[in-house]
Amino acid sequence: MAQCRPMTDHHAIKPGFTPPPDHVVIDEAAVLRLSELPSGALDALVARYGLSLEWVAPGVVIPGSFWGDDEAGIIGETLYVRPDTAVHSALHEFAHIVCMDEARRAAAHTDAGSDDVEEEAVCYLQILMADQLKGFGRERALADMQAWGYTFRVGTPGDWFARDADRAIDWLLREGLLRQSGRTIDLTFRPRGPA
Ligand SMILES: [Zn+2]
């Protein structure tokens, strides 16, 4: 099972999730921030899904942020971010909005309320979405997730993405969030429908 919430020593640990092992080094300074992306990159991705993005001014509390600080927030179908929000955090919370069924999305506030398989699907989706952001991409996404302390049963985010994500892929295909043609898997750019 994935332990794919970002966890740092000053954040509360979500019930049901365990802290990263001692050997995982968390390096918050190493990860790319939204202000370092080309302007409009995240806005374009969110718009392509027909969902909403709200930018919060520097220093202002981010509405709907489960982890607080600079981490992205969720209220309904709107993603809240600040320029200093980590790109992986924005993509993770955005992928949560995409993976919620319509009823849950309409009522969503702060806590995504995902079960384990949906949490894995969110992690998989955020890595594929990274390729849609100029200046980011899946390799940087995986490196940043590792630096932030995302841990998986099989090891690093890269190990999980390459070898152990079948359950997430099946779920995403079934819910219409990915499509497969031959050996290629692509985003559908549609949020999940009714449950
Ligand atoms: Zn999550």
Image: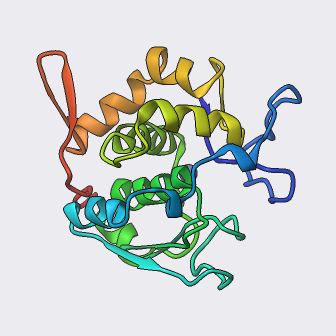
Please state if 193 lies on the left or on the right of 161 as rendered.
Answer: left
Is residue 16 visible in the rendered image? The answer is no
Instruction: Return the x and y of residue 100 as percentages of the image width and height.
Output: 37, 59
Q: Give residue 174's position: percent from left, percent from top.
A: 23, 37
Q: Can residue 88 be spotted in the picture?
A: yes
| Residue appearing at x 20%, y 52% in the figure | 189
Q: Is residue 128 left or right of residue 70?
A: left
Residue 185 quadrant: top left
| Number of marks present in the image shown | 0
Q: Is residue 94 left or right of residue 134?
A: right
Q: Quadrant of the C terminus?
A: bottom left
* Front residue (pair 151, 168): 151
Nearest the viewer among 61 and 76 is 61
Coloured how?
rainbow
Identify the image quadrant of the N terminus. top right
Pick out the residue farthest to the left. Answer: 181
Q: Residue at x 62, y 17 (%)?
A: 154
> Which quadrant of the structure image shows residue 148?
top right
Compared with 57, 4 (above or below) is above
Q: Residue at x 69, y 37 (%)?
A: 147
Q: Position of residue 158 (x, y in %)?
A: 54, 23
Q: Is residue 162 above or below residue 195?
A: above
